[in-house]
């Protein structure tokens, strides 16, 4: 018997994609692939908030640029729901570097470079909960 495993994950349409008006096309890709968009909002965050969101990367050489970038323009944050959505979203997004992303993935289709790679997705169920709370806890 197959057990149901309905999960929620956090997705972000990053500034490079919002700027190019790709919001609707990317949302369609989620819906076509069976994800429900439970919550969504378009916001712009402060650099200090980006630093908190990406704290796991604080020792990396790209951390400062990454936080400047995520706070550089409007983003769309969404809670996606589907069976096994954390892994499923990572698969649909494709590799971090769009050059390495599989055909048919969001990053292959829309990503410009490793830093401007159009979307964020939670990397584990545990982090999905933390990231959903980060943006949607009142
Ligand atoms: N990033 C970057 N340079 C790198 C690695 C990552 O600019 O060498 C950026 C990139 O935008 C990536 C984000 O930092 O999406 C977070 O990195 P992570 O390794 O968590 O990749 P992701 O989970 O987004 O695939
Ligand atoms: Mg990550």
Image (cartoon, rainbow, N blue to C red):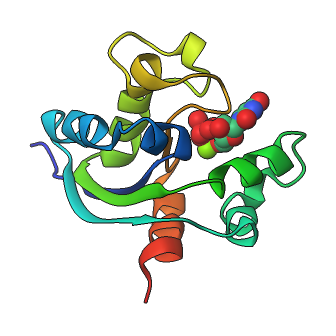
Front residue of 19 and 6 = 19
Is residue 51 in view?
yes
Residue 93 is left or right of residue 2, and the answer is: right
Q: Please give the name of the residue rendered at 50% of the width and 16% of the height, measured from the top-left corner.
A: 101
Residue 5 visible in the displayed image = no
Q: In which quadrant will I find the N terminus?
A: top left
- Give me the residue at 18% from left, 34% from top: 33
Across and down, in percent, residue 64 comes to 85, 50
Q: Residue furthest left?
A: 1
| Front in this rendered view, residue 5 or 70 | 70
Q: Nearer the viewer, residue 31 or 5?
A: 31
Position of 58 relative to 40 (above/below): above
The correct choice, above or below, for 12 with respect to 47 in the image is above
- How far across and how far down the image is residue 8, in percent? 32, 59
**Left/right of residue 64 with respect to residue 52 in the rendered view:** right
Total residue callouts? 0
Residue under the image location 90 percent in, 50 percent down: 59
| Quadrant in the picture for residue 26 | top left
Question: Looking at the picture, how far across and down is residue 71, in whole percent?
Answer: 65, 58
Q: Position of residue 109 (x, y in %)?
A: 40, 18
Quarter of the picture containing the C terminus is: bottom left
Answer with the quarter of the image where residue 47 lies: bottom right
User: Relative to residue 58, is residue 25 depicted above or below?
Assistant: above
Q: Is residue 136 above or below residue 123?
A: below
Nearer-the-camera pick, 86 or 115 = 115
Q: Is residue 118 left or right of residue 4?
A: right
């Amino acid at each position: 018997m197959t057990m149901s495993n309905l999960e929620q994950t956090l997705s972000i349409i990053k500034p490079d994609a919002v700027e190019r008006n790709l919001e609707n096309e990317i949302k369609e890709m989620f819906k076509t692939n069976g994800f429900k968009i439970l919550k969504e909002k378009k916001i712009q965050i402060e650099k200090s908030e980006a630093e908190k969101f990406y704290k796991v990367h604080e020792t990396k050489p790209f951390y400062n640029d990454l936080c400047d970038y995520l706070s550089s323009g409007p983003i769309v944050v969404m809670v996606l729901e589907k069976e096994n959505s954390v892994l499923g979203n990572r698969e649909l997004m494709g590799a971090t570097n769009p050059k390495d992303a599989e055909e048919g993935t969001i990053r292959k289709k829309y990503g410009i470079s490793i830093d401007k790679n159009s979307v964020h997705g939670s990397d584990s169920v545990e982090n999905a909960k933390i990231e959903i709370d980060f943006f949607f806890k009142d």
